[in-house]
Image (tube, grey):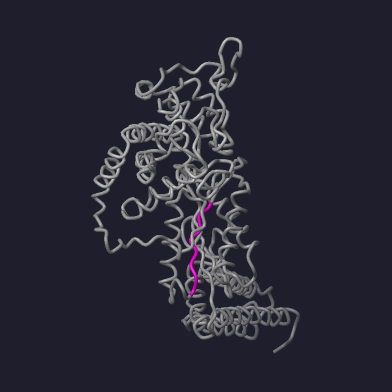
């Protein structure tokens, strides 16, 4: 065979074509091995294609068709086919590798928040239980929930909600140790595992997280700055559970109780009141909730007719405030029950104190200050009222943190309790009592505005004014139980004309024994209650 320039070209093209199909086969085979996939027919098909194209290249190179001295256009077409096969093999390998990587990432990392997935959390929790059991160690489990996140999604859109979840996950991760795990638990909930941590240390970390989030701002997709709060349920291995399911159940129960307290709370499972009734109490079904409320209200009525009438009107006022703020109907109903029962603890306060004219002695004040805690103990006997108990316990807290019984401050006080506090004070000022006469609506609102930000939540005070302005029936009902109702004027807005309108507090002075938690009108204070 004579070797000429066209023969050299044909041989070179054949070598390039064989190299390309061999490289394509190698790429396909490596993608199967490195991807750890089961052996399929793809490498076999690729091998057969390599043999076919190689044989065709050799035949065209050394046994050219007629017109061999012409330019080898047939081999050029074959080379183009080999290039195409190589390109397809490389592209398929890249896409296959990317798909496997994404699949692995989805299994271990939450796609939205970029923290550990729920599957990783379950595996890590089981591992920590096993490790702590073998080495006699302990660890802490948190379950964190964003308060009112559903409303945020509805108001600002799911894009803003997703953005906030991503930012929240980043902040949680930045405030924990490298050995701690932050995982997406589901929806707007995150779970955190803190190895080698005892209960006290875990509560400190949880409280630090809560305060940090409450004090931060989050930006929506449209640039709006929002302030959010979270609730955390905390449990400890092995005191609260010896297995992964037991610990998750304990943390969720603690979280549910924190939400029942009004949110923005850290709750340890060991401090959640037992839902089992004491030996001397017969538990009633959930359907008996209304009967329980009526029974307790009747007990208050027998104890003090004024207190019952006062509680009924406080319940109506509190419901109106809750609706004015825009709370959901189930929350309005809960606050209504809390308003009706907020003074149930006064069953244990002597008549001589409740009806005393003039200032109370320090010992008498101490007795009065116990009525929220006493009300809590009474309501603990009825598990059906567990969700209302925090409102009764905290309705004498002050917005500035100087109230009682726990000196909670600001948003740490359940919203329902803040609402009841304002409704309680408003009606107490309007009502006639043995130790003072009732005041007008104008005087009552001016007094609540004066104490707005110190004793009362400013948002609640504004909602109370709006509710009374909008509800003529409520105005008439309150007016029928005390001094006449006067429509809000410039005085109610805090722009009084001293020459035209005498100050309702000028002739009076605060009860000296009441301390800082006192309204200006005698006998009406956060210490004494209504």
* Quarter-of-image position of residue 65: bottom right
* Image point (61%, 42%), residue name: 225
Q: Nearer the viewer, residue 213 or 22?
A: 213
Camera-side residue of 432 and 83:
432
Our reading of the magenta stretch's main secondary structure is strand
In the image, what residue occupies the spot 56% across and 83% down? 33
Establish if 438 lies above or below 176.
above
Q: Can you give x and y, in whole percent of width and height, for residue 242 in the image?
A: 44, 77
Q: Is residue 425 left or right of residue 480?
A: right
Q: Quadrant of residue 95?
A: bottom right
Residue pictured at 55% horizontal, 16% vertical: 490
Q: Nearer the viewer, residue 272 or 4?
A: 272
Q: Position of residue 377 (x, y in %)?
A: 38, 53
- Residue farthest to the top? 500
Magenta-drawn stretch contains 233: yes
Residue 368, horizontal then vertical, whole percent = 45, 43
> As drawn, is 315 to the left or to the right of 128?
left
Q: Which residues are magenta?
A: 230-237
Q: State whether residue 431 is above or below residue 490.
A: below
Q: Quadrant of the N terminus?
A: bottom right
For residue 506: magenta? no
Q: Residue at x 46, y 81 (%)?
A: 41
């Amino acid at each position: 065979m004579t070797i000429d320039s066209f023969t050299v070209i044909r041989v070179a093209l054949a070598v390039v074509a064989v190299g390309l199909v061999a490289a394509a086969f190698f790429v396909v085979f490596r993608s199967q091995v490195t991807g750890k996939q089961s052996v399929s027919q793809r490498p076999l098909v690729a091998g057969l294609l390599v043999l076919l194209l190689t044989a065709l290249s050799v035949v065209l190179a050394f046994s050219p068709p007629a017109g061999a001295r012409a330019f080898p256009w047939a081999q050029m077409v074959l080379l183009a086919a080999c290039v195409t096969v190589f390109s397809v093999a490389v592209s398929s390998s890249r896409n296959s590798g990317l798909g496997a990587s994404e699949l692995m990432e989805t299994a271990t990392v939450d796609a939205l928040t970029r923290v550990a997935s729920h599957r990783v959390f379950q595996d890590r929790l089981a591992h920590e239980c096993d490790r702590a059991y073998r080495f006699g160690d302990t660890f802490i489990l948190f379950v964190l929930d964003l308060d009112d996140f559903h409303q945020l999604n509805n108001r600002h859109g799911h894009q803003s909600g997703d953005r906030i979840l991503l930012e929240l996950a980043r902040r949680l991760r930045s405030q924990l140790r490298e050995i701690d795990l932050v995982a997406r638990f589901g929806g707007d909930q995150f779970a955190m595992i803190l190895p080698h941590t005892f209960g006290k240390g875990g509560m400190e970390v949880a409280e630090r997280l809560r305060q940090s989030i409450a004090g931060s701002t989050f930006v929506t997709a449209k640039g709006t700055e929002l302030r959010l709060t979270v609730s955390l349920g905390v449990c400890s291995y092995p005191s609260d559970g010896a297995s992964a399911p037991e610990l998750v159940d304990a943390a969720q129960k603690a979280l549910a109780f924190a939400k029942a307290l009004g949110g923005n709370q850290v709750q340890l499972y060991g401090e959640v009141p037992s839902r089992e009734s004491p030996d001397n109490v017969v538990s009633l079904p959930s359907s008996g909730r209304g009967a329980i409320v009526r029974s307790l209200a009747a007990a208050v009525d027998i104890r003090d007719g004024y207190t019952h009438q006062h509680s009924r009107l406080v319940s109506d006022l509190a419901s109106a405030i809750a609706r004015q703020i825009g709370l959901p109907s189930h929350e309005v109903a809960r606050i209504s029950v809390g308003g009706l029962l907020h003074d149930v603890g006064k069953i244990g306060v002597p008549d001589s104190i409740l009806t005393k004219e003039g200032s109370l002695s320090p010992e008498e004040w101490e007795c009065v200050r116990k009525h929220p805690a006493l009300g809590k103990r009474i309501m603990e006997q009825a598990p059906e009222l567990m969700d209302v108990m925090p409102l009764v316990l905290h309705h004498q807290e002050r917005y500035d943190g100087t109230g009682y019984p726990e000196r909670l401050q600001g948003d740490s006080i359940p919203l329902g309790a803040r609402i009841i506090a304002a409704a309680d004070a408003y009606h107490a000022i309007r009502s006639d009592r043995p130790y003072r006469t009732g005041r007008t609506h104008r005087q009552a609102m001016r007094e609540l505005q004066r104490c707005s930000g110190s004793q009362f939540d400013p948002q609640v005070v504004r909602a109370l004014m709006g509710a009374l302005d909008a509800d003529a029936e409520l105005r008439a009902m309150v007016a029928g139980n005390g001094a006449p109702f006067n429509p809000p004027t410039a005085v109610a807005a805090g722009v009084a004309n001293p020459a035209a309108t005498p100050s309702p507090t000028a002739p009076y002075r605060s009860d000296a024994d009441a301390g800082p938690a006192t309204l200006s009108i005698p006998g009406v204070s956060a210490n004494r209650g209504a």
